[in-house]
Amino acid sequence: MRRLLALAATMVALAVGPAAAEWPVTTFTLDNGLEGVVIEDRRAPVATHMVFYRVGGADEPAGRSGLAHWLEHLMFKDADTAVEGGFSALVAANGGQDNAFTSPDVTAYFQRIASDRLGFVMGLEASRMRDLEVGEAEALTERDVILEERAQRVENDPSGRFGEQRSAAMYLNHPYGQPLIGWRHEIAKLQLADALAFHARHYGPDNAVLVVAGDVDPETVERLALEHYGDIPSIGAVPRERVSEPPHAAPRRVLYEDARVRQPYVMREFLAPTRRTDPERAAALEMLAAVLGDGLNARLQQALTVERELAVATGAWFAGSARDYGEFAVYAAPQPGVSLDEIEAAMDGVLETFLASDGPSAEEMERVKTRWRASWIYSQDSQSTLARRYGHGLAIGMSIEEIEAWPETLQAVTAEDVMDAARAVLRPEASVTGRLQAPEGVEG
Amino acid sequence: MNLRMAAAALAFALLPPPPAEAAAEVQAIETPGGIEVWLVEAPEIPMVALELRFGGGASREPAELAGVTRMMAGLLDDGAGDLDAAAFEAAADGLALRFGASAGRDAVSVSARMLTETLDESVELLRLALTEPRFDADAVERARARQISSIRSAGTDPSALASRAWRAALFPEDPYGRPLSGDEATVARIDRAALVAARERALDRGDLAVGIVGDVTPDEAAALIDRLLADLPETRRDPLGPAEFAETRELEIVELDAPQAVARLVQPGIGRDDPDFFAAVVMEHVLGGGGFASRLTQEVRVERGLTYSVSSFLARWDRAAVLGAQVASDNARVAEAIAVIREEWARMRGTGVSEEELDDAKRYLTGAWPLAFDSNAKIASALAGFMSEGLPPDYLVTRNDLVEAVTLEDVNRVAARLLTPERLQVVVVGQPEGLERTDGGAD
């Protein structure tokens, strides 16, 4: 069954401004539960094929951190595609590119290929959805690869280590506090049986979202999906149950010192709602981040780099696309000769002034909305961005309507909404303040 | 079911690749003002992507002011004409104009995205940025602080250290050996006059390439390019001549207290004008360019688990080309990773590639080509790049024929001619175990 959804154009049919691209978006659902989304962007004869599973790092059993990500690696070693180079070599030999990523909430596999080869990559993807067969020795070698990946991404980079420590301090109970790639001591003990059990439990059509974007027509995509994925049995997937955070009662501070740090900085993160859990509040936080920290005219930049030359860089961000919790953050990196104490006090000053005020001016609201609208329109120029937007949204439990309502929700945000959100979220007891610096005596 | 599936997949893999023509149709136009512009009309999205490539890059900056071109490029959107940095940003925000300039070794590139409905005003603001940037003292000091901060951070970043070390080792006498950001001393020396001079050196129509893609007709495109660039001078620059490689290549260890070592292995590469260029592209793809299918990934990652990422690369600048490989591995195991890469270098030189590897590589390279051009911004950037390399406007379509024409003999000839496994410049950043400094010998 397919229904024609509102054109993607309505996503940007805003109170002001131009209409954006009109890539039609349609959906279908197969009998075995596989949800499909088709985005017709026919500018070039290529297609992006993505499968999102509703499982990620935050769904791992206790003591098995890194399992979801290791499984993602093992999916490229499926015996069904046991040729030199495996899965990716087959895609590459057909002129395609492929990869995958794991997040705390989803695991996604994707290929970009000439659109007339869509059926080919579907066949490959369906094969490793159905079952996974990997040799023990191969799996353990891949575990070594992951340990090297961890070294490269986390241990070799002071900022990587710092982020890991901050996240662990942020979450008192929820698994977002553990690193996606896994703790080294737990990765080292992962067993192939764990990965295969994880696959059997979570990888199936009724726990997946298929997204195809590009030079394709919806009828063909549905027919091909039925042909390749249609006979894979459902796994009886049940909605995810995750633990939640208790009320946060104490501000936390993390001091991470590393001799390699040459540019110290301070970052304060606050626990926040997400687009899924509270879209209006999330939209207001998006605007708050822009008012405080996006561009030279934002509050932090004006105070810390224009009026006083204290910071090399400063800003604010809101990460609201996760399933259960979001984070709002402000940060500042001091100029040489300015201490972290000074820069943190200056940053606090900006927040205090803002919280004591009537909120953003009409001019500021217009500035951040225009800025955001431009980003949205330009994002239509990227096929994979659109595919990810739909796939990720559906995989964390949002509906198409909720995904598409986002631009309107954002444009409806008022200055009062921004202030309400600031007061609700910028609470010290729900925050982690992290400092990254070199140890005393090391030239910084 | 497994074997059947694999067999079916393989059978499919042997079909010829689909025609790789991009939907893009490139129009070469000359503006009334005499500027050559390559255009793709793409009315689907109400936007225009523009790429300008000015052939006055960091290689032309004075050594004592190294980093000035990069700083200048970063300051172009920090105030122009009557608008200071904040006012300029507010004006750009109001128009939804997004633009940035970046400095390379050979060129300064300007990329802009504009909405059709505010195109004229956006072009005017962009013109102001290119012709009348203010370089106000406060904006310059902010830029200087950022650049020095990034230079300091690069001083303990293993990848940045490795890149810096191999460039310096390979090009001891050439600007290619210098870091684009300069160093703390040269950046401290940069003043307004130096920035003004850097702008004049770079933003000149003498060696300009223009790509434009979007919701715009040829006449509109010509008019907007003339308005944008009419005020810039057109000077003939003297060519700098080919860069000289160092005579000796050896092992260099850069000590850094980090758990994982980062290594680079480099040697002279092959230029775009060499008749064997595409044979080299195919060879390098098989060696280490093709992701999971490559020999380096198979041997270093899949077989031995020595790394998360290993790859080769063919880098080209206007005056030199480099062939290299990169790997990151545990300090205790990086020596083995380097040895395996050397062995693969030697195996490729000795026995070349198989017919099957050649076919797979061609299918990948021809198939992946259109994938690289799936957005207006990417096409605009590619067009400016092609034009600056002296390639024809239809290169987007004809390039795949050049790949298809490569024979096994071509690949194996270029492998034997190009690869010098015994004379690789090797740079390792970290605390590698079991590596001895070995002189690679002189020419």
Image (cartoon, coloured by chain):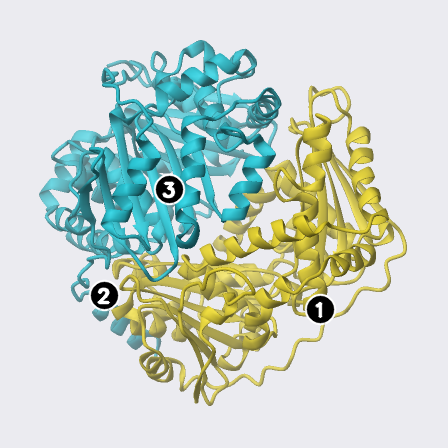
The residue singled out by tag 2 in the image is B13
Q: Give the quadrant of residue A112.
A: bottom left
The span from disc 1 to disc 2 (Cα, nearest Å) is 47 Å
Which amino acid does the dot numbered 1 rest on? Asp
Q: Which chain is yellow?
A: A
The residue singled out by tag 1 in the image is A278
The span from disc 3 to disc 1 (Cα, nearest Å) is 44 Å
Q: Earlier in the sequence, mark 3 or mark 2?
A: 2
Question: Could you say whether the residue bearing mark 3 is in a helix, strand or loop?
Answer: strand
Residue B192 vs A388, above or below: the answer is above
Instruction: Choose mark 3 or mark 1, whichever is in front.
Output: 1
Which amino acid does the dot numbered 3 rest on? Ser
Task: Using the rendered image of the protein, determine whether residue A439 is visible from the camera's viewpoint.
Answer: yes
The residue singled out by tag 3 in the image is B311
Q: Residue furthest right?
A: A249
Instruction: Choose mark 1 or mark 2, whichever is in front.
Output: 1
Viewer-closest of B128 and B265: B128
Task: Using the rendered image of the protein, determine whether residue A264 is visible from the camera's viewpoint.
Answer: no
Residue A142 at what x, y percent from top left? 49, 54
Q: Residue at x 75, y 24 (%)?
A: A338
Which amino acid does the dot numbered 2 rest on? Ala
Question: Could you say whether the residue bearing mark 2 is in a helix, strand or loop?
Answer: helix
Q: Give the quadrant of residue A301.
A: top right
Instruction: Confirm or deny contact between disc 1 and disc 2 (CB under 8 A).
Output: no
Residue A85 at what x, y percent from top left? 34, 56
Task: Say yes or no: labels 1 and 2 on the same chain.
Answer: no
